[in-house]
Image (cartoon, rainbow, N blue to C red):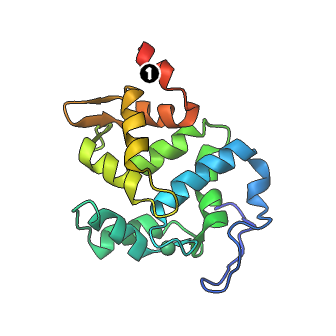
Amino acid sequence: MSEKATKKKKKAGGGGKARSGSEAAQFDQKTIQEFKEAFGIMDQDKDGVISKQDLKDLYASMGQVVSDSQVDSMIKEAPAAINFTVFLALFGERLTGTDPEQTIVGAFQMFDKKDGGYLTEDDLIKILQNKRGEPLDDDEIKAMYKGKPPIEGGKCDYKAFAHLICTGAADELTAT
Ligand SMILES: [Ca+2]
């Protein structure tokens, strides 16, 4: 219940994404970039706001149906429409001082209903390719596989995978 400087912004006509958000100041550029990745995954229609519909679409794109109440419970923590600044504020509260990798993990975790630390390979690929902003193309997916991602038997250890994304160092994974 801390007092936040979160300002309510209107959904439409808001202009840019996180223009001079005060919350953004506490994160470095790299962290912001990671947050943007996660935000981009969730903002399905790329209007700069994560809406209930975005979340539903996101799940639907993976063949999962979520109820309104499930989506509500995800969204209700937000003090306002979830634009990038609010997103930063929401996740930043939990993640300040934490590895940005956790942000990506958090995004993947939303699809891990069993909370077992794994996503199916299918879901993972769908998530990666569904990013309308900059989806991975087939070549990039192939390149990803060359990096020996932590995928085994159709299941992906997404925490290790988040590490792969964040470090961008496929070699590290090959070494394990
Ligand atoms: Ca949206």
Q: Depth check: 53 or 152 in front?
A: 152
**Element class at badge 1:** helix
Left or right relative to 115: residue 45: right
Where residue 125 appears, as percent x and y from the top left, is 33, 48
Where residue 161 appears, as percent x and y from the top left, is 42, 34
Placement of 16 over or under 11, stated as above or below: above
Where residue 69 appears, as percent x and y from the top left, is 31, 73
The residue sitting at 32% across, 67% down in the picture is 70
Picture quadrant of residue 156: top left
Residue 150 in sight here: yes
Placement of 95 over or under 62, stated as above or below: above
Left or right relative to 128: residue 59: left
The residue sitting at 59% across, 58% down in the picture is 90
Left or right relative to 151: residue 82: right
- Image quadrant where one finds the N terminus: bottom right
Q: In the displayed orientation, state which residue is furthest to the front.
A: 139
Residue 112 in sight here: no
Picture quadrant of residue 14: bottom right
The residue sitting at 67% across, 38% down in the picture is 97
- Count all numbered tags in the image, as a single digit: 1
Of the residues shown, which amino acid type is indicated by label 1? Leu
Q: Would you name the residue on which mark 1 appears?
A: 173
Mark 1 surroundings within 10 Å by alpha-carbon count, few (fewer than 14), some (14 through 19), many (20 or more): some
Where residue 20 appears, as percent x and y from the top left, is 80, 65
Task: Classify mark 1 as within 8 Å of ligand 1 or not, answering yes or no.
Answer: no
- Image quadrant where one finds the C terminus: top left
Placement of 40 over or under 7, stated as above or below: above
The residue sitting at 32% across, 54% down in the picture is 126
